[in-house]
Image: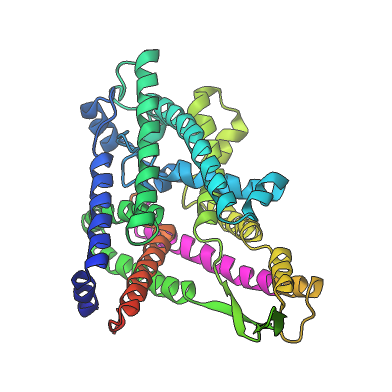
Amino acid sequence: MLGGFVNALRTPDLRRKIFFTLGILALYRFGCAIPTPGVDYGNLEECLASGDQSGFFQIINLFTGGALTRLSVFALGVMPYITASIMIQLLRTLVPRFQELHSQGAEGQAKLTQYTRYVTIGFSALQAASYITLARNGGLYGGPCPNPVIPDTSWSRILIMILTMTAGTVLIMWLGERITERGLGNGMSLLIFVSIASGLPSTGYIVAKSDSSYAWFWVLLTIVGVLATVVYVEQSQRRIPVQYAKRMVGRKMLGGSSTYIPIRINMAGVIPIIFAASLLSLPQLIVQFAGDNAAAWVRWVNIHVAQTGEPLNNLFYVLLILFFCYFYTSITFNPDEVAENMKKYGGFIPGIRPGKPTAEYLDYVLSRITFAGSLYLATVALAPVLVFKWLGLGTQVGLGGSSLIIIVGVGLDTVRRIQSQLERRHYEGFLK
């Protein structure tokens, strides 16, 4: 591994990409520490010391590297962009125009990317206004703050804060795209990776100062077990063989090759976990916005369902993850579209007729793999929560299954990219 890094740094083009990526990531972390105009950081520190976060806000704060609770310029992180991307993918199944653009190749993809940017700006402004409102009433910190985090609540000051956070999100989007184009790896994924990694020291400190003398052992054992499971499952895939028949194109005989369709066990990634936490946090949002005027049933749901670690919360958490695994996988992988493309280019699965039978077979395989993947995702997401609750750490430790999946996934993807570039330059493999 060390020799692979040395070889990568000796390659001029690869070295430039590595240092360019590291420079962008350092710039991103610097932006996470720049305060938004109008925030009193003295009062903010008091509020952070007295508050407690859980649920959706804890996940968002984890993905922003703590920038959300500190209301920095990059407080929104990459979440508006992720939300916009998911929305555009959903519209592909509902709006024929978006599906047509998707099938047009690079030109259509460029237009969809442009639409994603516009939607990102809209989501950023809405989320900035919501988070500022929650910060003012203490909802972002789990309860009222001793002193106001935003002393000046005039419309002009709030508007400046919204514009600043929106501009920060646009800059993050631009930085991520620059990494993807000129750096090493997927830009947005690396930004999330760095945000999560920046919270590891604070997690270690929380575990070290806990009352349980063996807390560090059980936390370490849980993390190692989850990491081993994630590495094994994320690299596992079901390969469906595909054979292409020979055909004449002009005077040339094309085709006759064999390949396969790789279907990963977890095709939905961490999206189901984010969606599930978002829905479970809705009662908390309603109570925080409504205050004492919230309905009695909403307060009951907030106490027994929305609070992390409660039995009903764990049950609904698992059920929602199972549902969103199937839902998101059905959006990202369309058996009918894959079968149609295979038929168009003369491909077929051995023993399966082209066309509708192929689509039915792919749907059959996909549904069963997704079931195993959804159980794996629910287990990985819930195991750290149960262990931390058993140790009495509650929701203090933000390192959960979703963050471990991202760390492993981004790490493996980056290693594969470096290895492939080294092999193209006739170097020994990165892992050898």
**Residue 369 included in the magenta stretch of the image:** yes
Quarter holding the C terminus?
Answer: bottom left
240, above or below 130, in the image:
below
Q: What segment is highlighted magenta in the picture?
A: 365-394
Residue 125 among those drawn in magenta = no
Q: Nearer the viewer, residue 153 or 205?
A: 153
User: Residue 176: where, in percent of width, then height?
Assistant: 37, 49
What is the magenta segment's predominant secondary structure? helix
Query: Which x, y percent locates residue 149?
Result: 30, 25
Q: Nearer the viewer, residue 234 or 69?
A: 234
**Where on the picture, by quarter, is residue 210?**
bottom left
Q: Residue at x 34, y 79 (%)?
A: 423
Q: Is residue 114 above or below residue 89?
A: above
Q: Nearer the viewer, residue 206 or 404?
A: 404
Quadrant placement of the N terminus: bottom left
Residue 415 sits in which quadrant? bottom left
